[in-house]
Image (tube, rainbow, N blue to C red):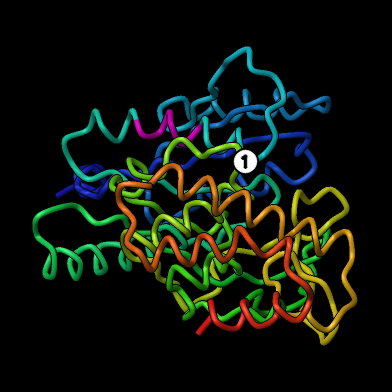
Amino acid sequence: MTDTQAATQLPLIVIVLPVYNGARWLGEQLDSIIAQTHGRWLLLLRDDGSTDNSNDLIAQYALVDSERIKVTQDDRGNLGAAASFSLLMEKALTIVESTPEPVYVALADQDDVWAPEKLAVCLQRMQTEEQLAAATNAERETPVLIHSDLRVVDSAGQVLAESLLNYQGLDADRHDFSAQLLSNTVTGCTALLNRALLRQALPVPTGAMMHDWWLSLVASRFGRLRCVDRVLVDYRQHGANTIGARQHTPGSLSWKTFLKLFQLRKSAQAQALFEGSAAQALAFEQRFADQLNEADRTFLKQVQRMPDLGLWRQRLMFRQLRR
């Protein structure tokens, strides 16, 4: 069997990558995707209204590898990260649905660097989880989201922290639905999604905090959310990050978790996070109203009430949801 024949027997992975003023680091990320040991992938790129030379750069890469690198064109302009990811995931889903064999979707950010084995490791875990799910529920496809740990680096690639999960004080084993409602443990640029998850989660609603948080909620409630205990991405921190990583220290504020908010006096930023999670919980309840049980509805209503509670009642409810 030739290398080409062997490659065509591998599952196809569609990688979606929105680009916005990312020319400074984009080439390094694209090179790391091209260097993946899992060679059967298709990269969908979309420029989100860049004012630098990002558009020219992705066009050059698409010209060199036109079979695997595709630049999508539309007149939607600047949508922002979450909406641009949602649009690309919907385009990827059309490819998934038109392909008879299993196809998976990976999310990528423009300023990171992937380990060469990233896709291969996540795919292996994905297939294991799908097999486990099929053994317990053969009647339907189970939504599965696989993600991994990351290394935090600065703009020059120097290591700031060997583990993002440890850096932010996140526990990836807390993957139940109630815990994810208040503390997303998924960093989108590490995520691998299966067809069942895409079908159920898309489109990402405007009420979602971010696309990766929404995906984690759908996977945790209706399927399987699992973390690979390996660092597979260098997660670059610089002044233009959409979200970025903040170190977990006593009394600090992290967008990923509300626990440390209770060591602070109420602030406008803290309240905005509660309001965002409440809006996301409402969007989830509205989308999946006929698929929820009483426990789900109780969790969702509790989160929707969080912005209006006093500090100590917020703290008590947070602990109840994360048990």
The residue depicted at 49 percent of the width and 67 percent of the height is: 299
Whether residue 79 is situated above or below residue 102 in the rendered picture: above
Residue 92 lies in the magenta-colored region:
yes
Magenta-drawn stretch contains 284:
no
Q: Indicate left or right for 3 with 108 as reference.
A: left
Against 117, residue 197 (above or below) is above
- Which residue is nearer to you in this view: 219 or 245? 219
Q: Is residue 70 above or below residue 223?
A: above
* Left or right: residue 37 compared with residue 273: left
Q: Residue furthest top?
A: 75
Q: Where is residue 220 drawn, in percent x and y? A: 40, 64
Q: Residue at x 62, y 77 (%)?
A: 318
Looking at the rendered structure, the kind of residue marked 1 is Ala
Query: Would you say the magenta stretch is mainly helix, strand or loop?
Result: helix
Judge from the rendering whether residue 158 lies leftward or rightward of residue 69; answer left or right. Answer: right
Which residue occupies the foreground of this view, 52 or 213? 213
Q: In front here: 56 or 177?
A: 177
Dividing the picture into quadrants, the one containing residue 94 is top left
**Which residue is painted at 59% across and 63% down in the image?**
303
x and y percentages locating residue 56 in the rendered image: 71, 23
Instruction: Tell me what residue is drawn at x 41 percent, y 37 percent.
Output: 42
* Residue highlighted by disc 1: 82
Coordinates of residue 117 in the picture (x, y in percent): 45, 64
Q: Which stretch is magenta?
A: 88-93
The spot of residue 166 in percent (x, y) is: 66, 82
Q: Secondary structure at mark 1?
A: helix
